[in-house]
Amino acid sequence: MSSSFNFHYFKHNICLSTFIAVKRSQKYIKNSWISMRETLRALHNQTYKAPYFLKADDATYVIMENLRNALEYTNPRIPFIMGHVYEVSPNEFTLSGSFGYVMSKAALELIVLKGLDQLTECGPIKNVREDVQISKCAKALGIQLKDSIDMFGMSRFSNISITNLFGAINNGNNTDRILRWNPTETDYTQSVYDFKKLPASPLLISFGGLIPVRMYVLEYLIYHLRPIGITHTILQNRSYSSVMNRVHVTN
């Protein structure tokens, strides 16, 4: 994943001289929002001004080509955060941080300049998850939460692990188990197929909850394995640009 970035930024509990990093003395899990606030300030103060900022942890694998496609028709001057958005209560939406989300430059500036030191929702609240609190902060500032949806209505920031995507499920008793995905039903080289039966978007942006060895497996399967004679021509005949992004307005 990292080889496809324009610029890297790390958050760590020790000072790292070889990386651009924000030093944190507190444990990240319990104080992730406190850490995120400091990181957002540091990003805003950097001389390198990127149009977008991606948040991902060390268990997240991001397919950067698909992320760039999702951002193709967006405007960094419009404040938004894009990721997997789910409803926690009626008319209340939040981001799933474990699978990554991307923030526009305008959203970063708004949070840092108008939120962190001025709004309660953006303040130094302890023992809260950063994805939950940044969603509340965004809502207070009128920043949109955007969920990138593909041509089949599937979120491209899926919040389901690989094991849950492809593993077997219990069919109501202790003996019968069925697969979540039947590959033959979605095989577009066959005369009959149905892409809506895919376990996740074919344009998925991220996987989460991965141990390092599984990241290497994904890297090989996605970027290095090339089955002879198979081309993904089906996508050339469908509109899959990010103009189809579903938007949850948070104000």
Image (cartoon, grey):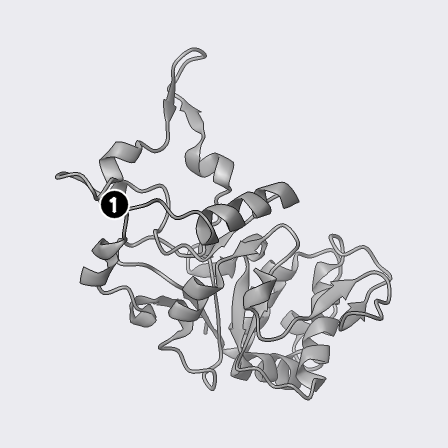
Q: Please identify the quarter of the rendering in which residue 156 is found.
A: bottom left
Q: For this rendering, which residue is in front, 26 or 6?
A: 6
The C terminus: image quadrant: bottom left
Above or below: residue 91 compared with residue 43: above
Q: For this rendering, which residue is in front, 144 or 52?
A: 52
* Residue displayed at 67% across by 83% down: 44
Above or below: residue 93 compared with residue 166: below
Circle 1 residues within 10 Å: few <14, some 14–19, many ≥20: some
* Residue displayed at 51% across by 47% down: 220
Residue 31: give x, y in percent of width and height: 76, 58
Residue 245: give x, y in percent of width and height: 34, 67
Residue 149 left/right relative to 129: left
Q: For this rendering, which residue is in front, 54 or 129?
A: 54
Residue ranking furthest to the bottom: 47
Q: Amino acid at mark 1?
A: Lys
Residue 108: give x, y in percent of width and height: 59, 79
- Number of marks: 1
Q: Please identify the quarter of the rendering in which residue 214 is found.
A: top right
Residue ranking furthest to the top: 175
* Residue displayed at 70% across by 63% down: 33
| Residue 158 visible in the shown view | no
| Residue 230 visible in the shown view | yes
Residue 210: give x, y in percent of width and height: 59, 44
Residue 236 left/right relative to 161: left
For label 1, the SS is helix
The N terminus: image quadrant: bottom right
Residue ranking furthest to the left: 191
Above or below: residue 157 compared with residue 38: above
Q: Which residue is mark 1?
A: 196
